[in-house]
Amino acid sequence: MADKTTYHGSCHCGAVRYEAKSEPIAEALSCNCSMCRRKGTLFAFIPASDFDLKSGEEALSDYQFNKRVIHHLFCKTCGVTSFGRGTMPDGTETIALNVRCIDEIDPTTIRINHVDGKNF
Ligand SMILES: [Zn+2]
């Protein structure tokens, strides 16, 4: 297995900053659910243990809908969703990175996998 890479993400105003360790991210998930189709979020998932929120916990606002298993977090100041928190069916705490907010990733160069989230 390849070494994990450290990625740096942030919201637009910079209140929310994080470091995330992951296998090299070469693809992301684009979802057509009522939330993602509006936001255009591109997701990559990592275990919560590989996620380090450097600043901004108090800047985050939480939005939940439907089954309320996902915390759709966004910055209260700039409105950007740089990551979300969720729980896998087996109970593992998971972070959904918005790869659009990660410094090291150019979203035009990665593979986008479309997922039919509106029918989950
Ligand atoms: Zn912000």
Image (spheres, rainbow, N blue to C red):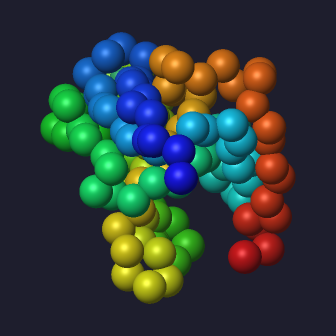
Q: Is residue 97 left or right of residue 55?
A: right
State whether residue 7 appears in this view. Answer: yes
Rendered location of residue 65, percent (x, y) = 51, 66
Rendered location of residue 41, percent (x, y) = 63, 40
Q: Is residue 18 left or right of residue 108?
A: left
Examine the rendered structure and indicate whether residue 5 appears above or below residue 11. below
The residue at 69%/25% (across/down) is 107
Rendered location of residue 70, percent (x, y) = 46, 64
Rendered location of residue 50, percent (x, y) = 33, 50
The residue at 59%/23% (across/down) is 105
Quarter where residue 64 is shown: bottom left
* Nearer to us in this view, 42 or 110: 110
The residue at 80%/49% (across/down) is 113
State whether residue 37 appears in this view. Answer: no
Examine the rendered structure and indicate whether residue 44 appears above or below residue 107. below
Examine the rendered structure and indicate whether residue 104 appears above or below residue 22. above
Name of the residue lying farthest toward the top: 13
Quarter where residue 33 is shown: bottom right
Q: Quadrant of ligand 1?
A: top left
